[in-house]
């Protein structure tokens, strides 16, 4: 009976390795806490959210186990530990949001600003005790490489802010004038459109490194671009990838940036750029001018 009730709430419960009886007992306790003792019943939707919350906290504890908790501790203890882990991650995310607010690129667009203003709502709505798996916020600004849909709760927020800061740090290495000129040619209207600010800069910085041109210029003459494109097309796939990844690393080094996060973001952008170039990507989307 216990298992049947839980499966009504969550049809995928069979994937869990926890004892159904232990889950059911803890869910009943959570419902009582959630209703502050006024009721022992809630809607199926709320029960599902509460169940997902406790299972998420148990999984957090499994992946980030506290040193003072035995691996065979009762589910209730592991869920409580997972909730505390979520709260610590929430504090870390608040620090990253502070950094994101403080260290902004020299040029922005409307969706960037609107999203930055909306991000604090996550912390006003986040509930690590009952619904640690939920993400009470909208993320309108598109990152160059999006956060995995597999991440939930504060882990999603943390990864979003980490990627946001990597992009912002990279953009801060360029002047406002060079960024504005590039965006005007790449997006035409970069201030009001829902576009990513990192992508065209990362691509052009990599192309400049390939051509041996100054990275900060963010521009290539047509002949320089044609030479780079022809060279990449003549190489086999592995050689071309090594060549363009080395160029992206040089761009990062010349800008005085360091750290694996910015290197990986640049490398992924370079891989995507190479794929489009070798697949006959429309070169008019890349900015080439003297």
Image (cartoon, rainbow, N blue to C red):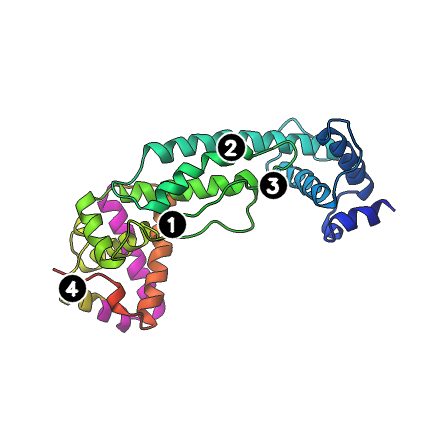
Residue 131 in view (yes/no): yes
Secondary structure predominantly adopted by residues drawn in magenta = helix
- Does label 1 or label 4 sit earlier along the sequence? 4
Taking 94 as reference, is 56 left or right?
A: right
Find the distance from the CA under tag 1 to the CA under tag 4: 26 Å
- Near mark 2 (Cα within 10 A), the count class, few <14, some 14-19 or many ≥20, is some
Please tell me how crowded label 1 is: few (under 14), some (14-19), or many (20+) other residues with Cα within 10 Å: some
Label 3 secondary element:
loop
- Magenta stretch in the rendered image: 229-256
Which comes sooner in the sequence, label 1 or label 2?
2
Q: Position of residue 45 (x, y in %)?
A: 70, 45
Q: Which residue sits at x=51%, y=32%?
A: 123
- Report how far apart the C-alphas of labels 2 and 4 lie in the structure: 48 Å
Residue wearing tag 2: 123
Tell me, yes or no, whether the highlighted magenta stretch contains residue 264: no
Residue underneath mark 4? 224
Contact, mark 3 vs mark 2 (Cβ under 8 Å):
no
Q: Are marks 2 and 4 in contact (CB under 8 Å)?
A: no
In the image: residue 240, left or right of residue 137:
left
How far separated are the C-alphas under marks 1 and 2?
Answer: 28 Å
Label disc, if present, on residue 264 of the rendered structure: 1
Sequence-wise first label, 3 or 4: 3
Q: Is residue 132 left or right of residue 223?
A: right
Residue 108, quarter of the rendered image: top left
């Amino acid at each position: 009976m216990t298992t049947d009730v839980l499966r009504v709430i969550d049809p995928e419960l069979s994937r869990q390795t926890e004892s159904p009886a232990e889950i059911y007992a803890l869910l009943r306790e959570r419902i009582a806490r959630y209703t502050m003792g006024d009721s022992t019943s809630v809607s199926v939707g709320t029960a599902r959210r509460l169940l997902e919350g406790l299972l998420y906290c148990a999984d957090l504890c499994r992946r980030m186990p506290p040193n003072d908790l035995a691996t065979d501790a009762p589910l209730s203890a592991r869920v409580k530990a997972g909730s505390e882990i979520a709260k610590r991650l929430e504090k870390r995310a608040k620090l990253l949001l502070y950094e994101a607010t403080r260290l902004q690129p020299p040029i922005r667009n409307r969706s960037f600003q609107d999203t930055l203003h909306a991000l604090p709502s996550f912390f006003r709505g986040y509930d690590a005790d009952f619904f640690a798996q939920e993400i009470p916020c909208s993320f309108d600004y598109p990152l160059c490489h999006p956060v995995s849909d597999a991440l939930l709760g504060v882990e999603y927020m943390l990864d979003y802010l980490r990627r946001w800061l990597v992009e912002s740090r990279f953009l801060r290495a360029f002047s406002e004038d060079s960024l504005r000129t590039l965006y005007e040619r790449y997006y035409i209207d970069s201030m009001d459109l829902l576009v990513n600010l990192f992508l065209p800069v990362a691509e052009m910085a990599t192309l400049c490194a390939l051509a041996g041109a100054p990275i900060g210029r963010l521009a290539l003459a047509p002949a320089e671009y044609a030479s780079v494109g022809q060279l990449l097309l003549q190489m086999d796939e592995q050689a071309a990838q090594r060549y363009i990844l080395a160029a992206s690393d040089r761009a990062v080094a010349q800008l005085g940036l360091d750290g694996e996060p910015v290197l990986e973001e640049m490398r992924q952008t370079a891989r995507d750029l190479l794929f489009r170039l070798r697949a006959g990507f429309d070169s008019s989307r890349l900015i080439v001018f003297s």
